[in-house]
Amino acid sequence: MINARRFSIRGLIESDWKREGDRFTWRLTMSTTSTARGCVPVFASGATILEGEKPLGDNSQLNVTGIQSGYVEMEAESGRVCLR
């Protein structure tokens, strides 16, 4: 597992992720008034990305900004996010 923590001028930002085979889990916590951009790898064609127990498109906190070969680009609002 990879863990990172940083105190920004807007507060604490935490990120940890791990990969087990073709499964990727990323937990991200951002302080209020913050947004983040990131890329989530997609290891299998037709794979579903979940935020918690919901498909990515069903979450108003996350916005898909692009889809590239092998990953999905997104933007997240402040709070906690857990992607799988």
Image (cartoon, rainbow, N blue to C red):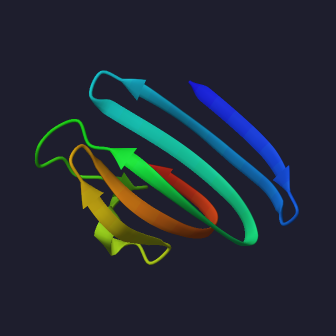
* Quadrant in which the C terminus is drawn: top left
- Residue furthest to the front in view is 68
Can residue 51 be seen here? The reply is yes
Q: Position of residue 42 (x, y in %)?
A: 26, 43
Identify the residue at image location x=42%, y=51%: 39
Q: Quadrant of the N terminus?
A: top right
**Residue 60 is drawn in which quadrant?**
bottom left
Tell me what residue is drawn at x 32 percent, y 55 percent.
Answer: 72
**Res 84 visible:** no
x and y, in percent, of residue 15 in the image? 63, 43
Quick check: 47 above or below 30? above
Which residue corresponds to the image point at 33% horizontal and 73% vertical from the top-left?
Answer: 58
At 25% from the left and 54% from the top, the residue drawn is 68
Foreground pick, 38 / 82: 38
Looking at the image, residue 14 lies above or below residue 35: above
Count of all numbered marks drawn on residues in the image: 0
Judged left or right of residue 84, residue 68 is: left
Q: Is residue 2 above or below residue 39?
A: above
**Residue 64 x/y as whole percent:** 36, 68
| For residue 11, above or below residue 19 | below
Between 68 and 18, the one nearer to me in the picture: 68
